[in-house]
Amino acid sequence: MSAIAVDLKVKQGFRFYESTIGKKVVMAVTGFILFGFVVGHLIGNLQVFGPPEKINNYAVMLRTVPAALWAARIVLLLSVVLHIVASIQLTKLKWDARPVKYQIKENVGSTYASRTMMWSGPIIAAFVIYHLLHFTFGWRVLSPHFDQHNVYNNIIYGFQFWPASLFYIVAMVLLGMHLYHGVWSMFQTLGVSHPRYTPWLRRLALAFALFVAGGNILIPAAVLTGYLKPVMGV
Amino acid sequence: MNVTLHVWRQKQGAGKGRMVRYEARNVSEDMSFLEMLDVVNEELIEKGEEPIAFDHDCREGICGMCGFMINGVAHGPVPGTTVCELHMRHFKDGDDLYIEPWRARAFPVIKDLVVNRSAFDRIIAAGGYISVSTGSAPDGNAIPVPKEKAERAMDAAACIGCGACVAACPNAAAALFTGAKITHLAMLPQGAPERPQRALKMVLQMKEEMFGHCTNIGECEAVCPKQISIEVIARMNHDFIRASWSEREAPYRADQPAGEPSAGGCQ
Amino acid sequence: MELDAKIPSGPIEKRWERHRFNLKLVNPANKRKYNIIVVGSGLAGGSASATLAELGYNVHCFFFQDSPRRAHSIAAQGGINAAKNYQNDGDSIYRLFFDTVKGGDFRSRESNVYRLAEISLNIIDQCVAQGVPFAREYGGALANRSFGGAQVSRTFYARGQTGQQLLLGAYQALMRQVEAGKVKLYPRTEMLDLVVIDGRARGIVTRNLITGEIRSHVADAVVLGTGGYGNAYYLSTNAKGSNATAIWRAYKRGALFANPCFTQIHPTCIPVTGEYQSKLTLMSESLRNDGRIWVPLKKGDKRAANEIPHEERDYYLERRYPSFGNLVPRDVASRNAKAICDEGRGVGESGFGVYLDFADAIHRLGRHTIEERYGNLFDMYRSITGEDPYNTPMRIYPAIHYTMGGLWVDYNLMSTIPGLYVIGEANFSDHGANRLGASALMQGLADGYFVLPYTIGDYLAGTKLDKTGTDHPAFQEAEANVRCITDRLLKVNGTRTVDSFHRELGKLLWEYCGMSRTAEGLKYALGKIPELREQFWKDVKVLGGSKELNQSLEKAGRVADYFELGELICLDALTRNESCGGHFREEYQTADGEALRNDEDYSYAAAWQYQGEGVEPVLHKERLEFEYVHPSQRSYK
């Protein structure tokens, strides 16, 4: 490929990203990756309802190939960064696009979830940092009982502290809302729309949102109600 | 019936305006909203006050000239209706009505409720056409167009360019407007040759004009007087993404007449 | 003044072709040296601007709206005629020509009409290529419907928004040329005077409606595509901004005004509800294809429509005109509606309305089909009246809709001022005394796409124009004139609003020079209008300044012109002692109430020449020859 052709490709890529749709595509694609992770993460975590060994072995399994683990982490981190950068740039555009606000503005066609993406997003981001410190890195202040080899107990001790559970539950409700709009919006941004299947995409988004939020809330709820208890000597 | 109006008054050239209260008395329910404003204006003139400036022309919901916010909703509370076709029977005696102009950087306020929407024209100029000069057309029936495609093109082509979609969008995006034109021409075989370039040029122009981005929330389709669906936005996204992938060279500018050197614009 | 229409000779089907060959051409390399001003951006102005720019001319396009896409052509609903004969029902160019001449009640120019019918074919092709989403059959071919009195299906349509779609096609073509740098747009700019130098149109003076700036523009030719003057009547189906100022100022600069009294009343409009009424809404005439018009048999029957049994209804059009029924031409349908209401059999609150009933059609075709054909019209009716036309019949009443009269032009569309071209509704040429449905769009586009671009070249190639600038005394004088009118309007500072004057003038015109006219009434109006005009100049109240957006000032200037134009309309109506098409003089009718033409004395186009303020204009007559379609009494029995 000649230098000129490369230069053109770079220019085109740059121009693509410059457009609002380009940024939205970045958000959609990274959002999809993160969505995939969230679903996988939940399915993994639901093993907490099985015997304690199951989830502990699962945690070990995830770490057996460090290269794969880090590859996944890099992809996720990159997705998070791009998702956030694009959203910040888009928000700036949005503020620029309407410098004078309305005195009164009613919403007649949109859902609460769709209008609050810029609120649910940062809160979820804050939660993710907390969550990593809490369970992945086991920061002592947050997780005094942290034991890297006993994921099962980490979860249960972590959630027995009710303020942590509460934050977790609130964050999951917001994540559910974020996904409810985000999953459907992703298809729309990528240009997938049809009167026949668009209503199903909306339902699918709702189902996933309920599954992710509900499944994730189930765990602290089970801990708080005493259904899940710590196990000694595993 | 009587209603209380709170109308945005902004002097020409002034950066700021304010809401001013007017009482509209003895309003007939058969009046259109603009006729109610006409009556208020007549009274203002008789009192020696400057009438409220608002854009309007055909008064039958097709020219797209009129439009403002009524109680925070573009074109008022009745779906699928422009303010000129909105009748007072949809309001109650004693209602408080807040009337504001479209607000967007791309639509600067000229005076009171009048805004400048030339940005829309520039989006169309960027590529919202089929390049066919007069006289070079084949027979109208030479290329069959499936009825369903023609209907879908018409659904999108119904756009009147009023700007309500931009006004209602929290991001002041022009996605519905631009998507409607892209979809109209994309549905027809005649529009196919320029389809990728059209999407590229129009979408980039949208950004140039300082419109915001689409978050797919659907406020625009809810206020659109022609009830154009946000499916057209998906179509625009599709065409833009595809064109961005498959593009081989930088987009060309609008072509010049054959055999003519560039005229370089006129004074 | 001798009126030379420059009609080519020879067999009618060869005339346009031969004429085109005889027209001088401008060298392609020279075209960009010419500047052409086009006023108006509707079907005529928009298509002309785009096409002239494609040819290489520098075009300057002026319009008072904020975008060229808003011109009032956009409101045309029904469709556009073309003699394609796609339906194989016996249509042909000759038949369209024949129907148009006959429909115009033998007051149009045969050669022009034939050319229009010929070009109708190209228009459809052009519009399809531009992406106009015309209605289609399942197989993908273009669909047609029969429309307004035609016995063949030759009307092409895009739902009920044909005008919109055709205009958007022209607008898109125009914007393509704007992007190419060949057209400069002047939005929110109103032409207020024409500048004539050495007897040739060389420019215009405009007011920028936002800044109030008065500016001169020089050009090699000026094209007016500014539409009709129906708004003189205050209540009409025209857009509020549609006005006659451009053509009127051109008239005052020496262009002849032809057949001003030929105004068309549209039979299917939504009736007036009150004094505040600002305009009338038209519903496409295509409604008459499936709707049946009736009124109660008994006077003053106030029962709801659905409670009146079939035997007590009078389907008066079907009764009087068995072969055409509800599809009689517009003027016949309108006059009958007025006569019925004057009898006291009108329906609705005011008694000024007749029913248009779809119950039979819904029963026969199903609601779905009716919805598909007229859905948007029904929605519009419901939103305006609050009544559901699927369940109760619509109420309709005639309203001023189109003006066949306009500036006189020759076969080349040039007015009596060399270099001043007039296209579309603004000229008088093609529709005679009555326009057929779906022909206005056809004429606007024919003029703009396919006639003017050829004929203007002939003028430019054959004329040596001296270089001139805005400092020429003629420009200075015109600018001063415009400033003078503006200042005068602002200085009056009386007590009455512009609209109140306009409404009063409109009522006078509607009453005495509307659907039917009498010498006595016209004389009364001719006495009354100058009085009202005098009062206007003494008592009008226009607030605000001239250096800003001032909508009252804009209106005041237009209304001032309507007073003068209104007088000319009445004078023309009084002079034409016959009934023809839209001009119905009560004194001249057949025993059964039909228009009675007088071909011997009035087979001419009446072209009026301005003589100065307060002086009666001079009438010039262009004799109309009918070599092909021989005048006959119209009969729709």
Image: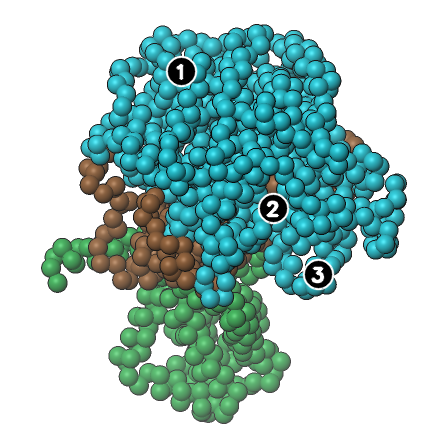
Could you tell me which residue is drawn at 27 percent across and 23 percent down? C462
Which mark is on residue C148? Answer: 2
Taking the image as shown, residue C111 lies to the left or right of residue B54, namely left
The reply to the same-chain question for discs 2 and 3 is yes
- Residues at marks 2 and 3 touching, judged by CB atoms closer than 8 Å: no
**Which residue is label 3 attached to?**
C362
Q: Quadrant of residue B185?
A: bottom left
Q: Chain of mark 2?
A: C
In the image, is residue B209 above or below residue C407? below
- Spatial CA span between label 1 and label 2: 41 Å
Chain C tint in image: cyan
Chain B tint in image: brown
**Which residue is label 1 attached to?**
C195
Nearer mark to the viewer, of 1 and 2: 2
Q: Chain of mark 1?
A: C
- Spatial CA span between label 2 and label 3: 20 Å
The reply to the same-chain question for discs 1 and 2 is yes
Q: Secondary structure at mark 3?
A: helix
Query: Quick one: which chain is green?
Result: A
Is residue C378 visible in this depiction of the protein? no
Q: Secondary structure at mark 2?
A: loop
Taking the image as shown, residue C628 lies to the left or right of residue B8, namely left
Could you tell me which residue is drawn at 50 percent across and 66 percent down? C138
In the image, is residue A181 above or below residue B256? below
Front position in the image: C554 or C345: C345
- Spatial CA span between label 1 and label 3: 57 Å
Q: Earlier in the sequence, mark 1 or mark 2?
A: 2
Front position in the image: C252 or C550: C252
